[in-house]
Amino acid sequence: MDFNLETNEKGNLTMGGIDVHELADQYQTPLYVIEEDRIKSNYKRLYNAFSSHYNDFKMYYACKANTNLSIMRILEKEGSGIDAVSPGEIYTSLLAGFDPSKILYTGNNVTDNELKFAVESGVKINLDSISQLKRLSNIPEAQGMDISFRVNPMVGAGHHDHCITGGPLSKFGIMEEEAVEVYKMAKNLGFNPVGIHTHIGSGILDPEPFKLAVNVLMDIAGKLSEYADVVFDFIDFGGGIGIPYTPEESVLDVNDFGEKITDLYKDKLDEYGLGKPTMCIEPGRYIVGDAAVLLTRVNTIKQSYRKFAGVDAGFNTLLRPTMYGSYHHIVVADKPFAESVQKIDIAGDVCESGDLFARDRSMPNVGEGDILAILNAGAYSFSMASQYNSRPRPAEILVSNGQSDIIRERETFSDVLAKQNVPMRLLR
Ligand SMILES: *Cc1c(COP(=O)(O)O)cnc(C)c1O
């Protein structure tokens, strides 16, 4: 995997046709740089891989991967729907121009107020528990709604334990064994249960667990049709399609994947006489993950017990390496293809020992002042950023065809302090 890096005549890394050094000088570091065209091509590639085999197909962008309004506008224009997991994401999606009918809300451990917010927003609601169903039935405006349920197919997969969302340890969804009961209960409460949903995990590059989950979910749908007379409008297999983060991994062949999944889908629809419901998936990482880099400047080279390159970003800026032990490929922006000559730790600026982007990473020569590009920083990167250590969160820049636009300004110290109040008695 070569990560599709592009360079200019100087050999410098470019994004959207612009030398990243220029971007670093103009907008300062740390800086998220996002390529518009990459988002569009990722969307189209995945959409075509499925819709060419089954045309009643929809994609709901899982916006928790990246909720920047401009990114959501790009996807709205592409025709995407939204997978929202919180009221804040519903609010953001509506603001980004998505029609409520194109937003599927899959909450987890939601409050009554959050359910009410979702009902009033007019979005589609995917329920995670019997408790939620009962509480939804207490909301007068929810009477007779179309709803769906998230089911745990007892299949899980993902790049880290924290990212496995199906199987016996997962907190998500209702059990297969109770599905018939729950759908019947929904009907008795006056709802229209027209959908079924699962999402087994994140960062999946192997089609097998996904296929297994599709199999199981379709068997459950068959049972629901037979024993609870459910007529499905849609069947949703969630997201989880991975991207290569290490040079050793290779991309998932989505055309082959799309064909295999849709074939399986069609076979199962026939087997159970389920008609032709809309097939849905909810990709997040696949759409935006490889569309961005995080630019960070080396400020310190230190040889202590180990050799460190200290940079001006940290786990407050990009949490994945610390949170999941994730590998992010890192290149020196003025020589992205240079041979490695050393092993070095790349360390952030947060006061925590766990604040490392890479340990013992094979790297070319790195010097103070160099710009590093941390690759694949489009998904679960800014959206997980924090202000820990009272550090303002960085800017986000959208690039396309030689043009750059600020789509989120760098925060200031006063942004970090916003909303704090000191009681009068402490001011005297
Ligand atoms: C996070 C999430 C997704 C997207 O996962 P990716 O790995 O980014 O594709 C899809 N559906 C639900 C319900 C999610 O919580």
Image: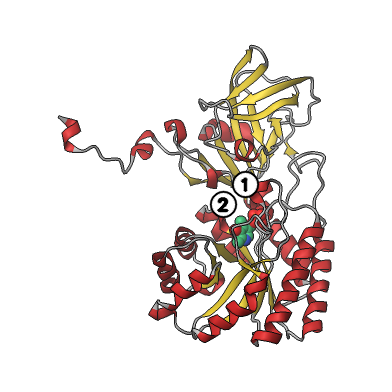
| Residue 114 location (% of width, % of height) | 42, 64
Q: CB of residue at label 1: within 8 Å of ligand 1? A: no
| Residue 13 location (% of width, % of height) | 70, 35
- Residue assigned mark 1: 378
> In the rendered image, is residue 192 in sight?
no
Q: Which numbered disc flags the more N-terminal residue, 1 or 2?
A: 2
What amino acid is labelled 1 in the image?
Gly
Crowding at mark 1 (Cα within 10 Å: few <14, some 14-19, many 20+): many
399 or 368, which lies in front?
368
Crowding at mark 2 (Cα within 10 Å: few <14, some 14-19, many 20+): many
266 or 43, which lies in front?
266
Give the secondary structure at mark 1: loop
Q: Quadrant of the N terminus?
A: top right
Question: What residue do we see at 59% from left, 47% from top?
Answer: 380
- Residue assigned mark 2: 66
Q: Residue furthest top?
A: 304
| Residue 28 location (% of width, % of height) | 52, 32
Task: Give the vertical position of 216 relative to 266 (above or below).
Answer: above
Task: Give the vertical position of 184 relative to 259 (above or below).
Answer: below
82 left or right of 409 in image: right
Tell me, what colour scheme is on the image?
secondary structure
331 left or right of 388 in image: right
Instruction: Confirm or deny contact between disc 1 and disc 2 (CB under 8 A).
Output: yes
Question: What residue do we see at 61% from left, 18% from top?
Answer: 368
| Residue 70 location (% of width, % of height) | 53, 55
What amino acid is labelled 2 in the image?
Asn
